[in-house]
Amino acid sequence: MLFKGVLKKMKTELSSQVQYFMDFEDDFIHMNQLLDKEISITFIGYQCLNCGKDKKIYRQGFCYDCFYETPLAGDWIMKPELSKAHLDEEDRDLEYEKRVQLQPHIVYLANSSNVKVGVTRKTQVPTRWIDQGAHEAIEIVEVPNRYLAGIAEVALKPYISDKTNWRTMLKNEIEDINLEEKRDELKQYLPEEVQQYFLASNKETEINFPVLAYPTKLKSLNLDKTPDFKAVLKGIKGQYLIFEDNTVFNVRSNEGYKVNLEILAN
């Protein structure tokens, strides 16, 4: 069976085990059903997620020009503390920035390779945690805009990491941490204007991923260098496909790449 489309971040659904879906323009693939099957991925071109043109992808699924023009790639997205919509100040498109920035945001702890602090819109819980491959996570504060979440994250960074070690996450070299205790420990470092939004009584969310076998050594698939690839799919974690030969493929890092995805064997 052959599917063709532009790669975008896989859609997810939290249940007893995370469910993954590849959303192509004309096809919707339930990726969990492909576990233990041989599949091929063939790179056939680019399609910028903003302008739609066949131009080499630069970052985040955008061509070079769009990356520096679209409001979907503003600096405030990666650095929430740079948000200015609450001040009525435009970065690239004030209407879009108000729509995204001026809504409830969560500062959270997620444990994937280690415990890290992060920021996401409330509507992206638990999607953001799944995308990071976290096996447990908890909210710290819920604030009314992205700026407040950003300054809270910045204040906590000296005391806890804001990065995930993707290699450790994919090897499943994990350690369970009491995130409720960690949350309470970090409260003292929150900025004064964020203290009132502290969440003192919520519980950890546990996440289980559909993985039949974790890799022992990692080889990352680069479609520009290896445009034709095939192997047996053994797992999905975060936004990575994990194959039997220890190859891993970051779907999100390849947004904007047009591919043929074919199921070769049952």
Image (cartoon, rainbow, N blue to C red):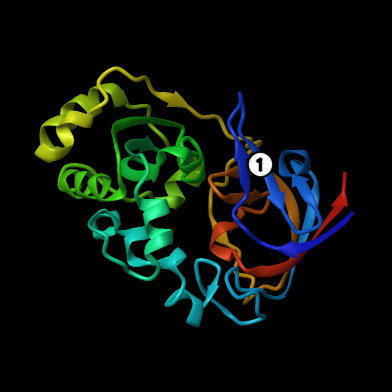
- 23 shown above or below 199: below
Q: Quadrant of the N terminus?
A: bottom right
At 55% from the left and 68% from the top, the residue drawn is 61
Q: Is residue 117 left or right of residue 232?
A: left
Would you identify the image quadrant in which residue 111 lies? top left
Q: Is residue 262 left or right of residue 142?
A: right
- 229 shown above or below 16: below
Query: How would you rate the neighbour count of disc 1 (Cα within 10 Å): few for under 14, some for 14-19, many for 20 or more?
Result: many
At 76% from the left and 41% from the top, the residue drawn is 36
Across and down, in percent, residue 113 comes to 39, 42
- 133 shown above or below 92: above
Report helix, strand or loop for mark 1.
strand
Across and down, in percent, residue 204 comes to 39, 23
At 34% from the left and 40% from the top, the residue drawn is 114
Q: Nearer the viewer, residue 173 or 61?
A: 61
Q: Is residue 213 left or right of residue 104?
A: right
Would you identify the image quadrant in which residue 82 lies? bottom left
Q: Nearer the viewer, residue 167 or 135?
A: 135
Across and down, in percent, residue 209 comes to 58, 34
**Total numbered badges shown on the rendered structure:** 1
Across and down, in percent, residue 124 comes to 47, 41
Q: Nearer the viewer, residue 193 or 45?
A: 193
- 164 shown above or below 87: above
Q: Amino acid at mark 1?
A: Tyr
Would you identify the image quadrant in which residue 18 lies? top right
Q: Quadrant of the C terminus?
A: top right
Name the residue that disc number 1 marks. 20
At 37% from the left and 55% from the top, the residue drawn is 98
